[in-house]
Amino acid sequence: MWAASCLASCCAACACDACRTVVSGISRRSARIAYCGLFGLSLIVSWILREVAAPMMEKIPWINHFHKTPDREWFETDAVLRVSLGNFVFFTILAIMMAGVKSQKDPRDSLHHGGWMMKIISWFLLVIFMFFVPNEIISFYESISKFGSGLFLLVQVVLLLDFVHGWNEKWVGYDEQFWYIALLIVSLVCYVATFVFSGFLFHWFTPSGQDCGFNTFLIVMALILVFVFALVALHPAVNGSILPASVISLYCMYLCYSGLSSEPRDYACNGLHHSKAVSTGTLTLGLLTTVLSVVYSAVRAGSSTTLLSPPSSPRAGNILSKPLLPMDSKDDEHEEKEHAKPVSYSYSFFHIIFSLASMYSAMLLTGWSTSVGESGRLVDVGWPSVWVRVLTGWATAGLFIWSLLAPILFPEREF
């Protein structure tokens, strides 16, 4: 017994030392990666509790205070939402605290990049605390999470458009035959993948003998948008490029697939989820894709777009013009000492993206519905999810066409 106690104490001490070493090793440059790691940890915790927490939560009186104990799926959903709420509160508090940070001289800059032991403990305590809040708060959070998830998808679309246009400008800017050929090859691959994908959608979601007019309409609409993108981009007045049009076409077709595959499993036109059993590998792959998607979107939104950078950031451009008359060199040196280097991205918006991503991941794991009986243990299943994905695809199409037409309609503005 004494030996076991000593061994447990040694293991705990080693674990604490390891955590302290990892936390102290987080530098300024690796802070964003650390935030992503913390967010990824929250998803793993949500996934684990979704699988194992139901029997324990059934015994908690302030959670299971019903006359009749709900189904197991209700407790699985509740566990995911409580972890998500703790994650949401954590990043929202950071977003509020970091509002208005424009210079690295601001004391909050060091708080954003450091204090990781305190942050991890605070995150852990917030997640634990959420298991003591009333069910009404969790129900309200679930309701607003649907709107927050839509905002996250909208931000994701804006980032994709920014990435695609930047990609095209970079390759065209080389002004070499090799890059023009590479641009053409990538565009052709995207178009071939788009049309092949559409063929699979017709095969999966419009089975013979079933009235699947709704699914047919969505697939045909996605194909129409593909041709509209190409026509607008290649119009002489627009002077666009085929690469962004092809990438956005493939993405819209993927959103169409994602929406159709999220239809309830008992829906006759859903050929993928018609079976009652879904393998663990399929669920794991879906969750892994979700993790990569939300983490990439959060990092991209917080650090790489000019639109989301603060005005004082070098990424946002030199908004304040230089003085007409040069100042004295001593004054310049004094001014450089007084004013620290501006931040390179908006800390507050960076944390807001993680807050929205927390809502989005919760909706993925709970099936986008208050009643999860129809979706069971499936990830991202339910009619609300279908419409969110479909509307996101249409919003993507509208934003892409607007990005092509806006410089023509408003030539006096910069886009």
Image: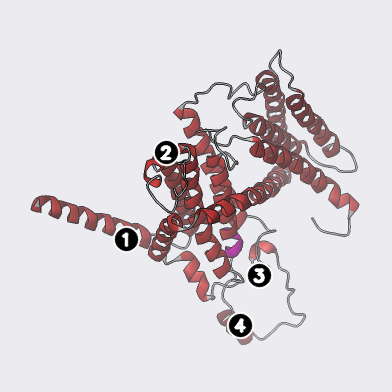
Asked if the residues shown at circle 4 and circle 1 are in contact, with their CB atoms under 8 angstroms apart, the answer is: no
Residue occupying image coordinates x 68% and y 68%: 311
CA–CA distance between discs 1 and 3?
35 Å
Q: Nearer the viewer, mark 2 or mark 3?
A: 2
For the residue marked with disc 3, what is the amino acid?
Ser
Q: Mark 3 points at which residue?
A: 312
Choose top left, top right, bottom left or bottom right for residue 105. bottom right
Q: Nearer the viewer, mark 1 or mark 3?
A: 1
Q: Name the residue under label 1.
A: 20
* Sequence-earlier tag: 4 or 3: 3
Asked if the residues shown at circle 4 and circle 2 are in contact, with their CB atoms under 8 angstroms apart, the answer is: no
Q: In this view, does 201 lie above or below 133?
A: above
Q: Name the residue under label 2.
A: 51
* Sequence-earlier tag: 2 or 3: 2
Q: Residues within 10 Å of mark 1 (few under 14, many from 20)?
A: few
For the residue marked with disc 2, what is the amino acid?
Glu
